[in-house]
Amino acid sequence: MITPFDDAYFMRKAYQEAELAFEEGEIPIGAVIVVADRIIARAHNLTERLNDVTAHAEMQAITSAANFIGGKYLKDCTLYVTIEPCQMCGGALFWSQIGRIVYGARDEQRGCIALGTKLHPKTILNGGVMERECSELLQRFFKERRKTN
């Protein structure tokens, strides 16, 4: 079956979530979770608003998707996230048994790849989708933040 939806399409949706985070003064990371070409969860970082270090975009999306599905396992789902998940999010994604993770930019210091975080053995990991745009949004956020501090 031919579908108009591809990884770039869904990453643009995650990027829109990152832009919302940016506007709200949150670190601009966005995520969507998709099943059968349908977005079932949208999220962005809420760590500042909720005063909660665990309120990463991925964590918010996992909870939302599990509530939508009515179960904790996301085997048939794909997470699109604008940056490589951190170790905490990677652990949660392991337990959710998510089928696939697609990320934009690498996090060379705190990402799950750099830290050797194990994902579920059946999880497929793909990166580099809209890498430049995702990376530039993060860089712009921190550049502007340094100006005001």
Image (tube, grey):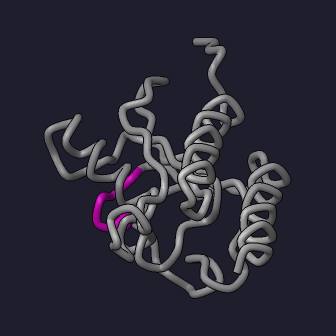
Q: Residue at x 54, y 67 (%)?
A: 85
Q: Is residue 133 on the magenta stretch? A: no
How many numbered circles does the render carry?
Answer: 0
Q: Main secondary structure of the magenta part?
A: helix
Q: Residue at x 74, y 71 (%)?
A: 142
* Residue 7, horizontal then vertical, whole percent: 66, 36
Q: Is residue 146 left or right of residue 79?
A: right
Q: Quadrant of the C terminus?
A: bottom right
**In the rendered image, the vertical position of residue 124 relative to residue 52, given as above or below:** above
Q: Is residue 96 on the magenta stretch? A: yes
Q: Residue at x 49, y 47 (%)?
A: 79
* Residue 9, horizontal then vertical, whole percent: 67, 29
**In the rendered image, the vertical position of residue 89 relative to residue 64, given as above or below:** below
* Residue 116, horizontal then vertical, whole percent: 56, 85
Q: Quadrant of the N terminus?
A: top right
Nearest the camera: 131 or 76? 131
Q: Is residue 9 left or right of residue 25?
A: right
Nearest the camera: 60 or 4? 60
Q: Quadrant of residue 47?
A: bottom left
Q: Residue at x 64, y 12 (%)?
A: 2
* Residue 145, horizontal then vertical, whole percent: 71, 71
Task: Identify the magenta region.
Answer: 92-98
